[in-house]
Image (cartoon, helix red, strand yellow):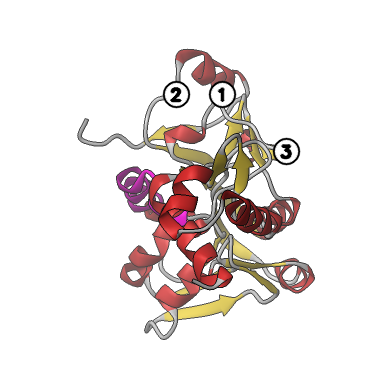
Amino acid sequence: MKSDSRRQGIMEILMDAGQAGVDDLALRFGVSKMTVHRDLDELEESGFLRKVRGGASIQPSSLFESDFRYRQKQAIEEKQRLAAAAVAMIEPGQTVIIDDGSTAGGIARHLTELRPLTVISNNLAVIQDLAGAGGINLIALGGHYSKKFHGFFGLLAEASLKSLRADVAFLSSSAIHGASAFHQDQEVVQAKRLMMAAATRKYLLVDHGKFGRTALHFLTDLSAFDTVFTGREPEPSMRAALDDAGVSLTVVGGNG
C-alpha cells in the first residue's frame, strides 16, 4: 500500500475510533512500527492528528482542534436541537452569517424555510448545502481552504468580512472556560471575531461537552453574545460563573 493511501486509512480509523495505537496500526497495514511513526509524524505536521503515548488521537486538546469530519459525528442529536432552536432568531429578508463550526453549520438545512435570505459563510458544508437554493442569496467567503476545518480563512476571507454587514451571526466555539470562549487556531479566531463585528446580533451554539474546556486562544467573553445556546444545563459552578458575568444562556432540552 502506498504511503498516501495508508495515511488516508489511518485517518479513517481515527475518524471512527478517535484514537489508535502504533502496534495496532502496524498490524493492520502490515508495516513496521517505524513506518507508522513516520506516517503519524507527517499527519501531525499537517495538523490532522496529535501524537500521544503509544499512538495518535484526533480528539481535541487545548492546542489541537479535531478534524471537521470527526466533529460532525459528535453530539449529533444535540447539535440538531441547537440549530432548530437558533433559527427562530432569523426573520425572512435578513442577512445571516454562519461560521465554520459543525454546530452552527447545522442551521443551513433550515434556511430555505425562511427565504428570502442572504447568507454569508466560510463554511464549505454550508456553501454546498445552499448553492443553487431558490430564494437564498449566497455569499461565499473566499480565502485559503482548510481541509481540516472544511472552510476558508486568511486575508481574503478577512477582507471580505470587513466590507460586509449582517443582521445576525451564528458561531460555534471549541471550548468554554468560565464565562469566555476559546479556540485552538488563531486564524479561525480572527475570522470569528470579524463575523461578530459585522453582525448586529450574535449567537453562540455549543454542545454541553464544550463547557469546562480551555484552548490556546481567547475568542471573546460570552457576554458579547445575545444568547448562548446549549443542549444541557451546565454544572452549578459553571452556571454560576455565567450568571455572574451576565451571560444569557438558553438550554435547549431533549427527550432525556
Q: Disc 1 or 3, which lies upstream in sequence?
A: 3
For marks 2 and 1, give the one nearer the viewer. Answer: 2
Categorize mark 2 by other alpha carbons within 10 Å: few (<14), some (14-19), many (20+). Answer: some
Q: Label for residue 242?
A: 1
Range shown magenta? 69-86
Categorize mark 3 by other alpha carbons within 10 Å: few (<14), some (14-19), many (20+). Answer: some
Label 2 sits on residue: 234
Give the camera-side residue of 219 and 116.
219
**Could you tell me if the residues under marks 2 and 1 are in contact, i.e. CB atoms within 8 Å?**
yes
Magenta span contains residue 149: no
* Residue farthest to the left, as pictured: 255
Mark 1 to mark 3 CA distance (whole Å)? 20 Å
Q: Label for residue 216?
A: 3
Q: Disc 2 or 1, which lies upstream in sequence?
A: 2
In x, y percent, where is residue 146? 63, 67
Residue visible at 25% across and 36% down in the picture: 254
Q: Amino acid at mark 1?
A: Leu
Mark 2 to mark 1 CA distance (whole Å)? 9 Å
Q: Label for residue 118?
A: none
Label 2: which secondary element: loop
Residue 12 appears in view: no
In x, y percent, where is residue 111? 38, 67
